[in-house]
Image: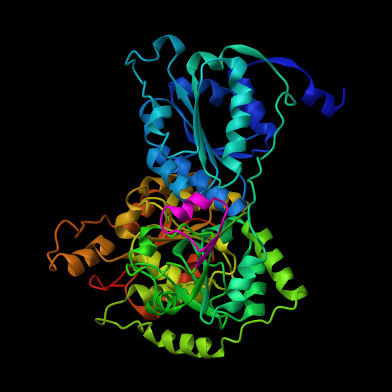
Amino acid sequence: MTALEENTKIKTLTGAEIIVETLENLGVNSIFGYPGGVILGVYDELYKRNSITHYLVRHEQAAVHAAEGYARYSGKCGFALVTSGPGAANTVSALANAFADGYPVMLICGQVKNELLGKNSFGEINITDITKTCTKASFQVTSAQKLHETLIRAYNIAMSGKKGPVIVAVTKDVLTQTAEFSAKSVEIHADEYHETCDINNAPDLICRAKRPVILSGGGVVHSDARDELVKLVSLLNIPVVNTLMGTGTFPKDNKNYTGMVGLFGNPAANQIIRESDLIFAIGTRLNNRVMCCFKNNEFSDKLVCLNIDEKEVSNSVKPLLTLRGDAKKIIKEMTDELKKTARDLPDISDWNLRVSALKKLNPKYIKKSDKLHSFEVIEEINRFIRPLKPVITTEVGQHQIWAARILDIDNPHKFITSGGTGTMGFGLPACVGASVACGNGLAVCIAGDGSLQMNIQELATLAQYNLPVKIMVLNNGYLGMVRQLQEAAYGNRITQTEILNPDFVKLANSYGITAFRVDKKEDIKSVLEKVFSTNSPVLTDFIVEPDEIL
């Protein structure tokens, strides 16, 4: 019998076998999880087959964050496996993060036996209802006959249109039930979105504008459209700004790049949006972190929006023109259309001069004391890692914004941050997943001392699998972002934001991880040389100025 015949042969399998074989047929080679009694049947089958590498995290939230980090770097669907009850409930924040930022994750979790459903049984939580608002779809499987079909359907939903997380809860008895199985029983495909756009109108509007600007968002990352965007901008010679999630979608050293917009963006970028007469927004839903800076209807009557989901933008502002489709495809078609037609490209030399002048609005980073400052650390890290080109994740806080502003990102898939929900504790487990996705390769996690402690137990995961993740802790002894808001909006009444930290060096050492401490700028380079000289996890604790603000 040939391999193809064996793969398509109808056979009788248990539910646990169906799950693992379905994952194998989907090409899954890595999964992140934490076992428990209800889901042990699947773990036993993973053990017997040994075809998929399981990474044991130390908290279920971290399993989904790791799966998302894997998905963000690889472009594939990330997979997580947890048990029922609190095991499943612990994943909710991470599912919400993947949902907000639009990355495909499939969570397979256990559920109590069919006969115990709805009886407040031990370990029972109605996880499918809990997650309906933070997943693209949630399923509960109570029959092995429906298991394979449901898994394939969930996968297709996760990978179609605007991607996102799905959850499949499987009752315990389904894992031992048997059903006929064939990999060909359900066709595996990612559903196509329905493209609706007029390629002619958008170029016409751009070419008629006197002060156009392109706003690049996370959809450019999803679509791998960086090269296409660069070509369009080169043709039109118009300024480009980006959202936080659009970091890396346009080269920072390009003369047309002017910075990041939004609450913690660059003043110049925000002012360019205000003074523009046409905004071509690509792959951004313009959430409140952006729109709060534009309360005078600066987007009205001048927004051309390209998004895979037109409802995303209409929630914030009504566009002048909406293009619905894949950013890579539409940008290329627009560029080709502009090249082949007799359109007069805009002469916006005066606008570009104004944009150059506006760049002076961006403040220079100034030291407040003789202490080491966060921006100095990120600048030195940037210089050191530029030739190494590692994947970079961040936690959430001031360090995240310093990283987005300063780091030179040559590939947007290599800058992984939590944008839609700002989930503290995301960066470290996401770095685990990203490192796995690039073949247990080099990855850097930029972290704050507060955010790191949300999932600091994942140091154990790094140590167990000896992943070459380099953790850079900007340690200011505060929840810095929250403290900054207290200073600005609450009369400098600083409360509950000063934090008592562990000795991060000793803590890392207790897991068998090498660690260093730096409190002087002149020591950074020599320590980084040691950090990156080993193919193992390393933590560096940078003691920085506590009163530094963005």
Q: Residue furthest top?
A: 115
Q: What is the x, y in percent for residue 279?
A: 50, 70
Judge left or right: residue 221 versus residue 39.
right
Q: Nearer the viewer, residue 342 or 548?
A: 342
Judge left or right: residue 545 versus residue 354.
left
Q: Note whether residue 541 is visible.
A: no
Residue 49 sits above or below residue 518 on the image: above
Q: Going 48% across and 17% down the picture, which residue do you hit? A: 172
| Quadrant of image for the N terminus | top right
Residue 240 sits above or below residue 514 on the image: below
Stretch of the chain drawn in magenta: 303-321
Judge left or right: residue 530 versus residue 496.
right
Q: Nearer the viewer, residue 316 or 125?
A: 316
Q: Is residue 318 magenta?
A: yes
Q: Going 47% across and 24% down the picture, which residue do you hit? A: 110
Q: Nearer the viewer, residue 459 or 330?
A: 330
Count of labels in the image: 0
Q: What is the x, y in percent for residue 230?
A: 63, 73
Q: Is residue 384 magenta?
A: no
| Quadrant of image for the C terminus | bottom left
Q: Nearer the viewer, residue 228 or 513?
A: 228
